[in-house]
Amino acid sequence: MGTRIGGDVVEGVLGRGGFATVYRVRSPEGYVSALKLLPLDQGPERAARAWREVSLGTRLCHPNLARQLGAGQWPHDKPRFVWVKFERVDGPTLEEWVPGRRLGEVVERMLEVVRALAVMHEAGVV
């Protein structure tokens, strides 16, 4: 760790998916956020998908969605990734949170998730 991307220092991995890795990063001012690295070297469809995600993030606004804080390419001189920086949302995952909760609490939380998914769907995210 310690790599600088988009002005922030990478502190660790938050998670990995089928298309990207998300890192915990810290700005020079000490602000912690999440930075997603999307590869550009996996074909033109994947590169188009990465830039589409950047575009969507600038248009999605909902209290149950993390705000996009910035985006760019990395490394700057020979880009191999698109980076997208989001506000960091602290707290447990649903898998960690659900055990021991009353059904009503779980239903309310799931409704929050569904509302965010509806906003994403309206923006064209499948």
Image (cartoon, rainbow, N blue to C red):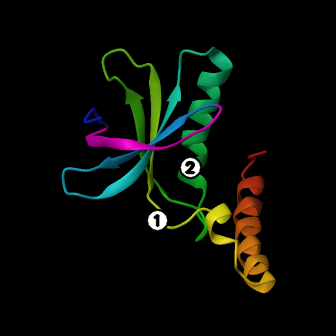
Residue at image coords 74%, 46%: 125
Tell me where residue 38 appears, x and y as whole percent: 53, 31
Q: Within 10 angstroms of label 2, few (less than 14), some, or many (20 or more) residues? A: many
Give the secondary structure at mark 1: loop
Q: Nearer the viewer, residue 44 or 88?
A: 88
What label does residue 90 carry, if any? 1
Residue at image coords 54%, 15%: 41
Tell me where residue 25 appears, x and y as whole percent: 34, 47
**Picture quadrant of residue 107:** bottom right
The stretch of residues the image draws in magenta is 6-18
Q: Within 10 angstroms of label 1, few (less than 14), some, or many (20 or more) residues? A: few
What label does residue 74 carry, if any? none
Residue 7 is covered by the magenta coloring = yes
**Picture quadrant of residue 45:** top right
Determine the residue located farthest toward the front in the rendered image.
100
Tell me where residue 32 appears, x and y as whole percent: 33, 56
Amino acid beneath label 2: Gly
